[in-house]
Amino acid sequence: MKEPMLTKGRVLIVDDERLNVAIVADSLASSGYEVLTAFNGEEGLRAAHDSSPDVILLDVVMPGINGFTVCRKLKEDDATRHIPVVMLTALTDRDSRHEGLEAGAIDFLNKPVDMIELNIRLRNVIELKEYHDHLKTYNEKLEKIVEQRTLELRNSFTDTIYRLTLMAEHKDLGTASHIKRTSHYTSLLARLLGLSEKETDIIFHASPMHDIGKIGIPDEILQNPGKLTPEQFEIMKQHTTMGGSVLCGSNSEYLKSAKRFALYHHENWDGTGYPYGLKGEEIPLEGRIMLIIDRYDALRSARPYKPSLDHKTTMSMLLEVGGRSAPSHFDPMVLDTFKEHHRQFAEIFEEHGDTDTEACIEEDLL
């Protein structure tokens, strides 16, 4: 089989003067170029789009749309903007050259064309385009590699955080399901409150770390089936500041958000919470979101000191004036949003009901 002839490049000539086109085309073909031709601006635009030449030789003065307009249209089209344009012109005034440069031309050649000069210009322009194409391809490959590595790193990061958080939950006799529910509760509430997709994603991954400070609380307090003494409760409250300390100092947006979840999720809107007794909007949004989420899930879940409650009972207890979770504890905007969409939170609890984490380990061993 005869191998195809290699060319120096593909050149599109756009000129309404057919004799000039024939002369230039013959000369370039004999020099090893593949030559395409068009005889007005519209034909040139179509040919450039369909054939993707390496360079376009474009006449300025043509009937219909002139070369300046053709050049601008080429540069406005994503499919042709990268093709270098060399303008062929008998115009020698500076204004015409400035207009051509503003339209996107890379070079000019005077008519009648000097073929030696044209070959040198074409060689330089095509070499420049080849370098540009190589750089573009390399950057695209590099972007894909970086994107894949970033995804792998992000997945590794979130998996590590999940396992650290699970360790804190195990100390408190919690479950993996509680962690999953927390992510879904908080991201749903964030979306309903109008947070951006990026902010919602950060909250999804950061919120399960709100109780990570419980790692530092003694087991006899965490797992106490009865009511805590005042002294024990004071120790229990320290899980907020312990969590904030563990998560402090990171440049990660996820860990910065997690710190706010850990430190402020027991602060009440009316200033009666802990550890700092903050009030109203002094409390970061993460704390205001987690307060109602944490209390809802705690009431729904079985604990050593209490049975699980159904959704209706839980809502009554959250909204009971004078109760442990009085409405005055919650940001009014957060509370109204939660109340309006309360069935969606119930669906999350039902979909991600408590499971035995040991079952996951046993499954891996089978």
Image: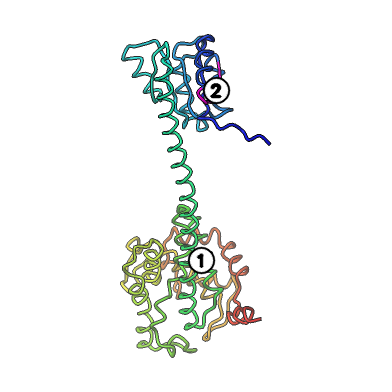
State the CA–CA distance, disc 2 to disc 1: 61 Å
Which region is colored magenta? 31-38
Figure quadrant of the C terminus: bottom right
SS of the residue under disc 1: helix
SS of the residue under disc 2: strand
Circles 2 and 1: CB distance less than 8 Å? no
Residue type (three-letter) at the residue carrying disc 1: Ser
Q: Identify the disc placed on residue 35.
A: 2
The spot of residue 71 in percent (x, y) is: 45, 22
- Please tell me whether residue 119 is drawn above or below residue 346 in the rendered image: above
Figure quadrant of the N terminus: top right
- Please tell me whether residue 206 is drawn above or below residue 103 in the rendered image: below
Label 2: how many Cα within 10 Å (few below 14, some 14–19, many 20+): some
The spot of residue 20 in percent (x, y) is: 50, 11
The spot of residue 218 in percent (x, y) is: 40, 88
Label 1: how many Cα within 10 Å (few below 14, some 14–19, many 20+): many
Q: Which residue is mark 1?
A: 183
- Please tell me whether residue 52 is drawn above or below residue 63 in the rendered image: below
Looking at the picture, the colour scheme in use is rainbow
